[in-house]
Image (tube, rainbow, N blue to C red):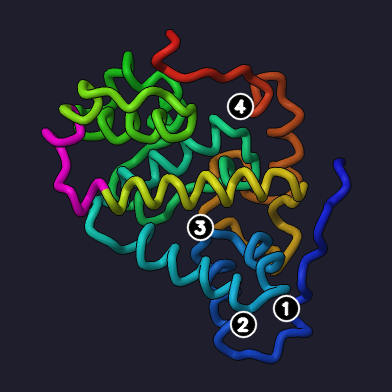
């Protein structure tokens, strides 16, 4: 296993009840799971900046949560952040997203699983993640499906999660290492440490596959 680059803050050493409550929420509900927040906890301002932004812009906000969830995992698969890519939003699961939706993300333009609104959001995400040209055709698609406030929130959210994921992937953190014992928000096949190890060892593990933008297909 790759060496972890920044240690976790042990929850047992934290005295702030609000921070402990947020870590417990991560344990019970996930997205994010506790490990990434246990890294951010080295700087309480960073911890709360992320927690508050994630609550206000991802879990809540003006744009549909499930669309933001698809965009979040598109980012994970593109930048190969395994920590983030092996999580699933419980809120989106309850709203009807299924695992096959996640499997089709990198081929979203050709997929029959997504509607035009979802495809436009993923094209927006793809443009941001892969630094593609911001063309009139893209914005015509976006303007037909989203309001300007929705586009602001979605663009900000994609930028936020892309930056965080590019950072987290350098740290070599993993699941079931902080406040372990729950499977909240874990993708199928990653419910505990043993299942996670088996899934990562599989030849068809998603992070072992070469990726490129759908626009290049």
- Which residue occupies the foreground of this view, 193 or 141? 141
Name the disc covering residue 169, or none. Answer: none
Query: Is the residue marked by circle 3 packed among few (<14), some (14-19), or many (20+) residues within 10 Å?
Result: many
Q: Residue furthest left?
A: 144
Is there CB contact under 8 Å for labels 1 and 2?
A: yes
Residue at image position (68%, 75%) is 43
Say which residue label 2 marks. Answer: 20
Query: Is the residue marked by circle 2 packed among few (<14), some (14-19), or many (20+) residues within 10 Å?
Result: some
Percent of width and height locating residue 56: 36, 67
Q: Residue furthest top?
A: 217
Which residues are the magenta region? Answer: 141-151
Say which residue label 3 marks. Answer: 31
| Count of all numbered marks drawn on residues in the image | 4
- Secondary element at image label 3: loop
Q: Is residue 126 above or below residue 60?
A: above
Say which residue label 1 marks. Answer: 11
């Amino acid at each position: 296993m790759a060496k972890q680059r920044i240690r976790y803050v042990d929850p047992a050493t934290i005295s702030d009840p609000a921070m402990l409550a947020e870590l417990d929420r991560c344990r019970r509900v996930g997205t994010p799971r506790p490990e990434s927040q246990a890294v951010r906890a080295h700087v309480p301002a960073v911890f709360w900046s992320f927690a508050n932004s994630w609550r206000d812009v991802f879990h809540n906000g003006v744009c549909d949560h499930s669309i933001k969830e698809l965009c979040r995992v598109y980012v994970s698969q593109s930048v190969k952040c395994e920590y983030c890519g092996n999580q699933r939003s419980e809120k989106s699961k309850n709203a009807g997203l299924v695992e096959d939706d996640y499997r089709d993300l990198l081929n979203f333009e050709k997929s029959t699983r997504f509607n035009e609104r979802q495809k436009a959001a993923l094209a927006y995400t793809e443009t941001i993640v892969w630094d593609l040209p911001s063309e009139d055709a893209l914005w015509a698609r976006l303007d037909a499906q989203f309001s300007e406030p929705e586009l602001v929130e979605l663009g900000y959210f994609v930028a936020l999660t892309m930056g965080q994921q590019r950072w987290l992937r350098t740290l070599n953190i993993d699941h079931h290492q902080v406040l372990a014992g729950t499977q909240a928000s874990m993708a199928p096949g990653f419910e505990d440490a043993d299942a996670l190890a088996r899934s990562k060892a599989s030849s068809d593990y998603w992070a072992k596959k070469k990726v490129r933008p759908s626009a290049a297909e």
